[in-house]
């Protein structure tokens, strides 16, 4: 009897932690303004924000209106960031959409042709480069909020950070070993959650290729950082899909026991893997949106949401990548600036103990410190053919040497 009461209590705590209130962006801003006017503490604001679920995308422009008021509230700002991340797959509020007329069919076709040309021609000529890829990992595993109390589900929280040097050479992405830090993390092993890759072009190539066997339709005009964006929606059936979902890690059925209490599924305590877990790989159908510059065809944002099958260990696997201009050497190129992946694990309704385990994993990635790969070569004319040897005074004649100071200025020849 005590065991049954305990399981019911844990299930109740889990459900209450996930009880969310759907709000529009305007309603959210009003509630947060009221809470700040009532002088709520940082932790109270963060808890309140964590209880909301948005029905519209919370854009950076809208976030900035409140961020200025929360400059000294780190917990509330983090909660806002996570709430905005989870809304990234939605459309912005109608008030933030542009009012240009829907393009005619011929104009839409021209835009898509520009986008396909951008993917095929421009991305294939992206210079060799390297950058720093930093990922913050969040999940909603149980936390001990107060000393000597049972762990409870209190929403997404940071579990670790990893940093790689990523090299893009001849169209291929290469990741160095990660430097990993944070609670419960390890120095080696796969990145937990949905493993993001392909931000430098492969994902765009897959989507633009697969949509030839799927569907792509006009959606709306949207305000971008530097002007209007043309937004299309697409869908690709499983039979035509080349998009792969890679997730780490799922608990093996043979290991489901109470021994994993307080950690991740499969007994992974807050960000580690063990011998009872395995990776999930699938090539599902998918859908999403593409936002492009109507002048150049550059794709500046893409979202991908997998259409997982009943019985899969995941019920959600989504990613979004934001692109923008980056200076590489003496030219500007469109490169990934940030990306995020959001996954939700399946909860076994027949086993109440799984309700104490995390179901959501969010990986937030930024790309910084871009540098173009290359070297310089100093070209010096043959001194022996252009001048006589110059002996050193009061010393025996020296061997013939190139004297750069007496030659034409050396040229700089960039090489990849």
Image: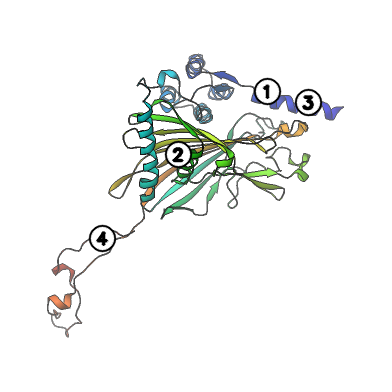
The residue that mark 3 highlights is 8
Q: Sequence order check: which comes first, mark 2 or mark 4? A: 2
Q: Residue furthest right?
A: 1
Q: How far apart are marks 3 and 2 (CA)?
A: 41 Å
- The residue drawn where x is 50% and y is 26% is 90
Q: Position of residue 405 (x, y in %)?
A: 16, 67
Q: Nearer the viewer, residue 2 or 244?
A: 244
Kindly identify which numbered label has been placed on residue 16: 1
Q: Sequence order check: which comes first, mark 4 or mark 1? A: 1
- The residue drawn where x is 49% and y is 26% is 73
Q: Sequence order check: which comes first, mark 3 or mark 1? A: 3
Count of numbered circles on the image: 4
Residue 37 seen in the current view: yes
The residue that mark 4 highlights is 413
The residue that mark 2 highlights is 338
Position of the N terminus by quadrant: top right
Q: Which of 158 and 102 is in front in this view?
A: 102
Residue 298 seen in the current view: no
Left or right? Give the position of 286 relative to 384.
right
Q: Decide: few, some or many residues near mark 1? Use Cα within 10 Å; few <14, some 14-19, many ≥20.
A: few
Q: Where is residue 171 in the image (x, y as percent from the top left)?
A: 42, 52
Q: Where is residue 45 in the image (x, y as percent from the top left)?
A: 54, 22
Q: Distance between the residues labelled 4 and 1?
A: 64 Å
Q: Which of 28 and 293 is in front in this view?
A: 293
Q: Which of 89 and 215 is in front in this view?
A: 215
- Residues at discs 2 and 4 in contact (Cβ within 8 Å): no
Q: How far apart are marks 2 and 1 (CA)?
A: 32 Å
């Amino acid at each position: 009897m005590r065991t049954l009461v305990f399981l019911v209590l844990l299930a109740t705590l889990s459900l209450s932690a996930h009880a969310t209130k759907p709000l529009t962006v305007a309603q959210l801003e009003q509630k947060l303004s009221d809470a700040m006017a009532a002088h709520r503490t940082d932790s109270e604001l963060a808890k309140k924000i964590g209880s909301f679920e948005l029905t519209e995308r919370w854009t950076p422009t809208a976030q900035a209106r409140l961020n200025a008021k929360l400059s000294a509230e780190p917990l509330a700002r983090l909660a806002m960031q996570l709430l905005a991340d989870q809304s990234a797959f939605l459309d912005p509020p109608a008030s933030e959409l542009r009012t240009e007329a829907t393009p005619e069919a011929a104009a839409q076709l021209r835009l898509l042709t520009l986008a396909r040309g951008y993917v095929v021609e421009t991305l294939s000529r992206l210079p060799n480069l390297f950058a720093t890829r930093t990922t913050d990992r969040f999940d909603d595993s149980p936390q001990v909020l107060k000393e000597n109390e049972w762990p409870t589900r209190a929403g997404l929280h940071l579990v670790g950070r990893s940093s790689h040097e990523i090299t893009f050479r001849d169209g291929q992405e290469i990741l160095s070993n990660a430097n990993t830090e944070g609670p419960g993390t390890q120095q080696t092993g796969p990145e937990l959650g949905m493993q993001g890759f392909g931000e430098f072009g492969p994902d765009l190539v897959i989507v633009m290729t697969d949509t030839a066997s799927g569907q792509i339709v006009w959606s709306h005009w949207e305000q971008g950082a530097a002007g209007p964006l043309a937004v299309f929606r697409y869908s690709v059936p499983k039979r035509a899909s080349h998009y792969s979902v890679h997730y780490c890690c799922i608990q093996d059925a043979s290991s489901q026991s109470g021994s994993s209490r307080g950690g991740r599924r499969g007994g992974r305590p807050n960000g580690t893997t063990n011998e009872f877990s395995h990776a999930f790989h699938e090539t599902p159908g998918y859908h999403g949106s593409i936002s492009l510059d109507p002048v150049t065809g550059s794709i500046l944002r893409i979202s991908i949401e997998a259409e997982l099958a009943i019985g899969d260990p995941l019920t959600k696997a989504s990613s979004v990548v934001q692109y923008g201009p980056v200076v590489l050497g003496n030219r500007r190129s469109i490169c990934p600036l940030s990306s995020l992946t959001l996954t939700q694990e399946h909860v076994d309704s027949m086993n109440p103990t799984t309700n104490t385990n995390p179901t959501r994993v969010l990986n937030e990635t930024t790309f910084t410190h871009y540098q173009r790969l290359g070297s310089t070569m100093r070209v010096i004319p043959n001194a022996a053919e252009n001048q006589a040897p110059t002996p050193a005074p009061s010393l025996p004649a020296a061997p013939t040497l190139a004297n750069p100071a007496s030659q034409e200025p050396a040229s700089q020849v960039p090489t990849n």
